[in-house]
Amino acid sequence: MTVVSFATSAPELIVSVKAALDGFPDLALGNVVGSNIANLGLVLSITVIMGSIDVRKGFYATDWPMMMVSSFLFFGFIYFDGVLQRYEGIIMVALLFVFLVYLLRYQKPAVVDEMPEDDVILPLYKIALFLGVGGVALWGGSELLIKGAVGMASTFGVSDRVIGITVVSVGTSIPELAASVIAVLKKEKAISLGNLIGSNIFNLLAVLGITSIITPITVMDQGLLTSDIFWMLGISFLILPLVFFPKGLRLGWRDGIFLLAVYAVFVYMTLK
């Protein structure tokens, strides 16, 4: 919910800031909205198809409600005037800070770590090296991703929003997919589920919050307000009943297949 989520949301942050500064606000917005949909519809579905996840009280008591609060806050800020203002970004970042303080001080793990004994702490020099190399690679990748996305939109005659909500969002969700699959293989399912819920919160409050503080974001393609944002709200809400039904506090392969089907419908409706 914290370290891994922030790390896997770094591509969304860099790509969104770069896109907004370059004058492609729909890429910035589409990237975040599409990534939130992809995290739950694509990444979570693949994760639970690989192995079921048992969920604890913290998920529905804190994590999921915070994701919904973040989603509705973003909806309220951008739906009525089509602009994410600087002061709204400050409010979003401030809310994230308060949530992180609460999470780190009071919250218990939402999912059981099945193999805590195999956790290994990296030496400080390796942490610094990995962060440095990863940061440079992220920035270089964001440059290539933005150029490729804009070029693809021009080539196929579709809007920046469509490319952002599909191609770019899946590209920036690859770290979440990699982290979640590795977490399942290593029996670290606490990281797997917490990473995805946390990433969605970070995407909204940190990525869009920081981006709008740097430069206000204006919606150019109304499809984001009439369709995409409702898909994001819908699939975010859908996770809660899936956790409780048909088996209480568990996500299994049937839930994964259902989420994958929902995501496929979303992509089809967006591209048609």
Image (tube, rainbow, N blue to C red):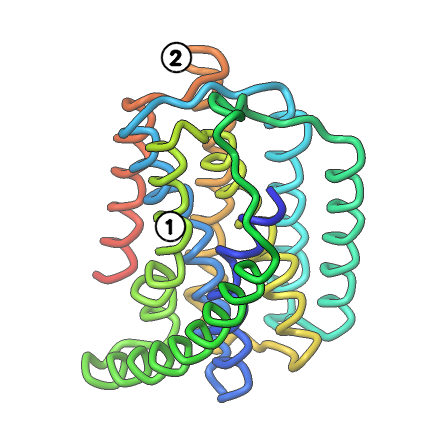
| Residue at horizontal 31 percent and vertical 40 percent from the top | 262
Specify whether 174 is left or right of 236: left
Find residue 176 and report its horizontal and vertical position in percent: 42, 50
Q: Which circle marks residue 38 in the picture?
A: 1
| Residue at horizontal 29 percent and vertical 37 percent from the top | 46
Quarter of the image where one finds residue 82? bottom right
Find residue 163 and report its horizontal and vertical position in percent: 32, 70
Specify whether 121 is left or right of 146: right
| Residue at horizontal 27 percent and vertical 76 percent from the top | 158
- Quote the CA–CA distance across marks 2 and 1: 23 Å
- Given the current orientation, which residue lies at the most extreme bottom position? 22
**Residue type, label 2:** Pro
Given residues 185 and 37, the one toward you in this image is: 185
Specify whether 254 is left or right of 138: left
Judging by the rendered image, the residue that carries numbered circle 2 is 246
Given residues 102 and 86, the one toward you in this image is: 102
| Residue at horizontal 54 percent and vertical 21 percent from the top | 112
- Whether residue 71 is situated above or below residue 249 in the rendered picture: below
**Residue type, label 1:** Ala
Quarter of the image where one finds residue 153? bottom left
Given residues 64 and 187, the one toward you in this image is: 187
How crowded pointer 1 is (Cα within 10 Å; few <14, some 14-19, many 20+) is rated as: many
| Quadrant assignment for the C terminus | bottom left
Q: Secondary structure at mark 1?
A: helix
- Whether residue 39 is situated above or below residue 111 in the rendered picture: below
